[in-house]
Amino acid sequence: MVKAKLPDNSILEVDSSTPAIEVAKRISRSLAEDALAVKINGKISDLNTPITGDCEVKFLTFDDPEGREVYWHSSSHLMAHAILSLFPEAKFGVGPAIEDGFYYDIDINKTLSPADLEAIEKKMHELADNNEPFVRKVVQKDEALKFFKEKKDPYKVEIIGALDGTITFYSEGEFTDLCRGPHAPSAGKLKYFKLLGTSGAYWRGDSKNKMLQRVYGVSFPKKKMLDDHLKMLEEAKLRDHRRLGRELELFVFHDIAPGAPFWLPKGMVIFRELEKFIREELDSRGYLEISTPMLVKKDLWEQSGHWDHYKQNMFVLDVEEETYSLKPMNCPESTYVYKHRTRSYRDLPLRLAEIGRLHRNEISGALGGMFRVRQITMDDAHIYLRPDQIVDEINDLIDFINKVYRIFKFEPSYNLSTKPDDAMGDPKLWEQAEASLKKALDKNGIKYGLKEKDGAFYGPKIDIQIKDAIGRDWQVATIQLDFVMLPERFDLTYIDADGTAKRPVAIHRAIFGSFERFVGILTEHYAGAFPTWLSPVQVAVLPITDSFNEYGKSVVDALLKENVRVELDDRNEKVGYKIREWETRKVPYMLVVGQKEKDSGTVSIRKHREGDKGATQLAEFVSSIKKEIVEKT
RNA sequence: GCUGAAGUAGCUCAGCUGGUAGAGCAGCGGUUUCGUAAACCGCAGGUCGUGGGUUCAAAUCCCACCUUCAGCUCCA
C-alpha cells in the first residue's frame, strides 16, 4: 500500500502501481470524468500513470491552467490527425498549446481555405466520437528517427535529432506523433472546437527557413464555454479602437502617413485630459517638466549606444553635411539638462519629466492601429538619485502608478526582472538595487512575478501589466533602474556632502507608456463609452421642438460657464432621432428639454445606456456632473 | 521585411465568366413642430488604392508599387 496525499491534505491509501485514474474514481465519479491529467509530486503525467510510492497527487481538470494546456495540446494532436486524414501528404512541424488555444504548423502544398478548416473541424468531431485513447510509448532514438524518415517528415526528424534522453510517441487511433505529453486520456474528452484561422509561420521562427501554415484553434469541454469564448472574440472585434476611433471621430489613419494617427478634435480632447491629469500628478510629486530637441546630431546616439544597437529603428537624415536623427527616446537628452550645471546631493532626486514626441521606424509589418505606431507621445520621466534613495522613490512610483490605474479601473500586476548574464555595472550595486525593488514591492503588499535574468543590461526593472474590462492583458508602465547607460556613458556626477563627486543612479519610467497606445487601450477598455471626465462631449442638450431651442441654449450656457463640454442639438428632428444618435455617439448625458422643463427650470436626464432618469433642477445637475468630472468617477 | 488576404461614394457593402458604376446610412435642400434608440420627399456625391500592360473595350485579366488586416515570440 502507498499513501496518496490529496490537495485537501487528506490521505488515500491504494495498492502500489494503481493507475492514477483509479485514485480519481475513488475520490468521485465526476472527478474521474473531468480529470485530464494528474500532477504527481509536482510532475504532470497521464492519468494512467501508476502510483508507485507515497506521493502528493493533484488531478488536473479544464479549470486548472495546466489542465487546459493538456486539453489544448491533445486538441492540436486531434487536429493534426484530422489534417493528415484529409491531406495525407501533409508534413508536421510543432503543435503546442498556447495561451488561448492551440496551433499546429503544417507543411502542405495548398493554402487552407475557410472551407478546408470547416472540413477539418468536421473530421475532428468524427475522430473525437471514435473516442480512441491517447497511448504513450517510449521509443529509442534510432527507432524514432526511422519512423519519421519513413513518413518523410523532415521536421520531426530534425527535432528528434536534437533530442537527448527519453523520447516518447503518443498514438491516438492510427495517428502517431512525437510528443512529450502528457495527454488527455482519450479523444472523446475533446468536445467542442473552433478552428480560428491560419497564418504563415517560419519553421523554428527563422525567416531563412521554409514558411509553414499555422492553423489556430481553440477547444472546450462544454458548449457554453466555446460560445462564451467566441462571444468574447466578437466583443473584442466590436471594441476595435480603429473602428471606434473613426466612428466616434477620435482619430483616423491615412495612407499619406503610415503608422501615425491624425488626431481629430474629439480625440484630442481625450489626449488633453490625460495630459492634464498626468501633469497635475507630476506637479504634486515634485517633477520638473522639460522639453528637449526632436532632431539631434547622431553624435548623441553614438555616445548613448543607440547608434550601435537601435539604428535600424531610427529615422536618420542628412542636413548640410551632418547626420541627424529624430529622437526615438528621450533619455539621452535628459542628461544634458542634468549636466547644464553642477549638481549637488541636495538636488537629488531630480525628477525630469518630458511629454515628448518620439519617432521609431517600426518595420511596416509591425504597424497596427494605435497599438504600434511610428510616432509616439510618451509620458516619460528620468529620475536621477542617490543609491540610498531608491527604495523611497520606487515606493512613490508604485503609489503613483496604482493611483493612475485605479482611476481607469485597470487591475495592475507586477513583474520584477533581475540581473541578466551580460549585465554591466558593479554587481554590488545590482544586488542593492534588486533588494530595493523587492523591498518597495513588499512594503506595498504587492504580489509580483519574478523574471530571472530578464532585466536590461544596465539595470533591473519592474514591468506593470494591466487587465482591461474584457480580461485582456496589456504591458504599459515600466520602471527601469539604470547604473550604466545614462550615468556612466554620459559621465553624470553630483557633489556629495563630503565634497567628492559621485555617480547618481537613473530611473527611466513611463506610466501610460505612449498616449497613442494608451488611448487605443482605453477606447477598447471602455468600448468607446468614456467616463464623463474623458468624454469628448459630456452633455448633449436636446430641445423637443425648436420652440425650446432658446431654453436649451440657456442650459448649454449654464454648463459652458462651468467648463462642461456640452453641445446643443437644435436640429429639426424628433427627440427619438436625436436620442438614438447621441446614444450611438456614447455621450454620457443627454438633457431633454420641453415645456415642462422650461416651466420648472429643470432638465430631464437621460444617461447613456441606462435611459431616462427623470427631471432634476438644472443647478443640481450642474453640481453633480461637476463632482463626477472632478472625482473622475 | 516575410507569408497570406483585402482596397469600389465620408461609412458599410453590391457589381457573375471584360461592354466605361449601384444600394443603405451619413451630407445638403424642402415639408413636418414632434416627449426618450431612425418622420417624409427630393438633390448631390466615385480617375473603382496608384502606375503600367493585354484588349475594339478593364472596377473586372496580367505586372509592379502603396496602404490596411491576420500572423511571423509561445517550440516534440
Image (tube, rainbow, N blue to C red):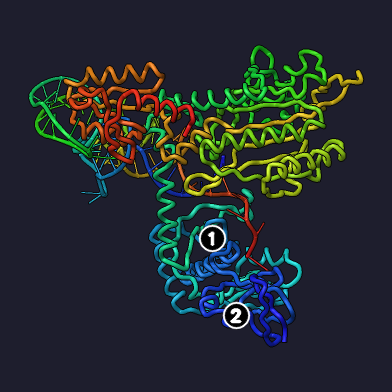
Relative side of B5 to B30, left or right: right
Instruction: State whether discs 2 and 1 lie on one chain.
Output: yes
Q: Which amino acid does label 2 sit on?
A: Ile
Q: Distance between the residues labelled 2 and 1?
A: 25 Å
Q: Which residue is nearer to you in this view: A629 or B11?
A: A629
Residue A178 is tagged as none
User: Quick check: A2 above or below A500?
Assistant: below
**Along the viewing direction, whichever of A200 and B34 lies nearer the viewer:** B34
Residue A377: % across, % down: 56, 27
Q: Disc 1 sits on a residue from what chain?
A: A
Three-letter residue code for mark 1: Phe
Identify the residue at image location x=34%, y=37%.
A608
Q: Is residue A172 visible?
A: no
Residue nearest the observer in this picture, B72 or A147: B72
Read off the residue under disc 1: A102
In the displayed structure, A619 sits above or below A27; it is above
Q: How crowded is mark 1: few (under 14 residues within 10 Å), some or many (20 or more)?
A: many
Earlier residue among tags 2 and 1: 2
Residue A396 in which image quadrant? top right
Q: In this view, does A52 lie to the left or right of B14?
A: right
Q: Is mark 1 on a helix, strand or loop?
A: strand
The residue shown at (22%, 33%) is: A577
Question: Residue B33 in the image: x percent, y percent?
Answer: 10, 26
- On screen, residue A214 versus residue A438, left or right, reads left
Rendered view: A437 above or below A315: below
Quarter of the figure that contains the N terminus of chain A: bottom right
Q: Mark 2 points at which residue?
A: A21
Name the residue rendered at 76%, 42% in the picture: A439
Q: How crowded is mark 2: few (under 14 residues within 10 Å), some or many (20 or more)?
A: many
- Left or right of A356 on screen, residue A346: right
Name the residue nearer the viewer: A616 or A561: A616
| Residue A299, visible in the rendered structure | yes
